[in-house]
């Protein structure tokens, strides 16, 4: 099965603790700029590398937690944002554990982010104890350029779920089952390629020895006249038409709803979606994208179509705000009456879950693109059924 998640590992610590040197030793490349001048790393720097028995991971080198320069507060804020994006945190110090590391460790525990500490520069300072406050401490010196102790520690602490082989169909599809993938090629379809959810669904079928049939909407009735597939998966935007031609005895869902389980919190989305009907005139709705893309002002799914569907369904004039990529949520999250999260094909489950749980804790209902569209089209129960059995 294809890996749909790439674990993210954040490197945190004070200025000049050797975070960038650690990244370079781990990756075996001069990825991050290293200098004796404090504050060399100003913004998070990402590097993809391969770890044996884990696969590809993304290392994130962050700015120092003790940056007192004019831009220090902004850099520290960016560093803290990274903590919401990682599956594992490595806290780097040199001479001793200070209030900065203690505060970060407490924050990791509060956010349920696994972590361990690395005492760098043990060629200069005596090695600390192998454990601090219940957390492992790895003694290390970047001068050795020997990354095995770090890699072994990463393997011990990185949650297996962050790099496990995921079944995008949740066990619903078996060997030799026929699954129809309805993939409209319209103005919003990328030129010459498929979108990532379609690619991942196809790979999931191949890995499971199932049979994938790719059709555009007009071809669907003719194919269904001769076949009864195990499942039909469609682009959510084509729900209305596809639902009208797929027999009731054939399960139907969408790529976005597949991803609501794979990358999000399916139960949270399931419980929140009916809250759409509670929206009132002037309510604020947050649209959560998880990638950067050029916006089609006529057909954009998150910025145009979903707002139109929600207003038509509720009969209310609503206010919409879009958060793109992994940009931080607004400070006043509790002001929003609904949030709508995209499928999240470009990010990890941890990044999506961290975002939507913060909203849920603030009392904001959070749904998913596919579920919201299904609710607006009156077929919510049907297209979520396969994961409720």
Image: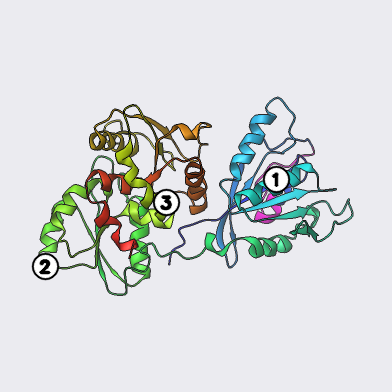
Q: Is residue 354 magenta?
A: no
67 relative position to 283: left or right: right
**Disc 1 + disc 2, Cβ < 8 Å:** no
Q: Residue at x 48, y 53 (%)?
A: 349
Say which label, 3 or 1, has the lower sequence index: 1
Q: Secondary structure at mark 2?
A: loop
294 vs 353, nearest the viewer: 353
Where does the image place residue 144, in percent across and percent down from the top left?
79, 57
Residue denoted by label 3 = 268
Per the model, the C-alpha gap separating discs 3 and 1 is: 28 Å
Residue denoted by label 2 = 226
165 lies above or below 384: below
Per the model, the C-alpha gap separating discs 1 and 2 is: 60 Å
Whether residue 326 is visible here, answered yes or no, is yes
182 lies above or below 38: below
Residue denoted by label 1 = 104
The C terminus sits in image quarter: bottom left
141 relative position to 301: left or right: right
Q: Which numbered mark, 1 or 2, is in the foreground of this view?
A: 1
The quarter of the picture where residue 251 lies is bottom left
Q: Residue at x 20, y 64 (%)?
A: 250
72 lies above or below 24: above
Q: Which residues are magenta?
A: 23-36
Whether residue 234 is visible here, answered yes or no, is no
The N terminus sits in image quarter: bottom left
């Amino acid at each position: 099965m294809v890996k749909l998640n790439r674990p993210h590992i954040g490197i945190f610590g004070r200025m000049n603790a050797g975070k960038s040197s650690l990244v370079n030793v781990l990756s075996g490349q001069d990825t991050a700029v290293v200098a004796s001048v404090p504050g060399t790393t100003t913004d998070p720097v990402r590097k993809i590398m391969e770890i044996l028995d884990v696969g590809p991971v993304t290392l994130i080198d962050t700015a120092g937690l003790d940056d007192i320069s004019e831009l220090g507060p902004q850099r520290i804020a960016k560093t803290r944002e990274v903590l919401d994006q990682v599956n594992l945190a490595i806290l780097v110090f040199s001479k001793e554990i200070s209030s900065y590391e203690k505060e970060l460790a407490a924050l990791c525990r509060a956010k349920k982010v696994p972590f361990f500490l690395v005492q760098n520069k043990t060629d200069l300072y005596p090695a600390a104890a192998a454990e601090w406050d219940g957390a492992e401490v790895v003694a290390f010196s970047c001068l050795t350029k020997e990354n095995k102790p770090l890699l072994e520690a990463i393997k011990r602490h990185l949650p297996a779920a962050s790099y496990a082989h995921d079944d995008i169909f949740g066990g619903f599809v078996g060997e030799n089952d026929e699954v129809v993938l309805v993939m409209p090629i319209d103005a919003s379809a990328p030129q010459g390629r498929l979108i990532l959810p379609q690619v991942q669904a196809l790979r999931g079928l191949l890995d499971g020895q199932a049979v994938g049939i790719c059709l555009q909407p007009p071809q669907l009735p003719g194919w269904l006249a001769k076949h009864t597939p195990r499942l039909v998966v469609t682009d959510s935007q084509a729900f209305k038409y596809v639902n009208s031609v797929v027999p009731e005895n054939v399960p139907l869902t969408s790529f976005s709803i597949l991803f609501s389980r794979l990358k999000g919190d399916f139960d949270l989305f399931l419980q929140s979606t009916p809250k759409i009907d509670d929206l009132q005139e002037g309510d604020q709705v947050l649209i959560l994208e998880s990638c950067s893309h050029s916006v089609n002002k006529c057909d954009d799914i998150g910025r145009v179509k979903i707002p139109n569907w929600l207003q038509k369904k509720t009969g209310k004039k609503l206010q919409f705000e879009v958060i793109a990529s992994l940009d931080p949520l607004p400070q006043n999250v509790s002001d929003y009456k609904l949030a709508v999260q995209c499928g999240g094909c470009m990010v990890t489950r941890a990044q999506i879950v961290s975002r939507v749980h913060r909203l849920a804790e603030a009392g904001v209902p959070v749904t998913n693109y596919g579920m919201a569209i299904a609710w607006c089209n009156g077929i919510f129960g049907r297209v979520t059924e396969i994961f409720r059995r």
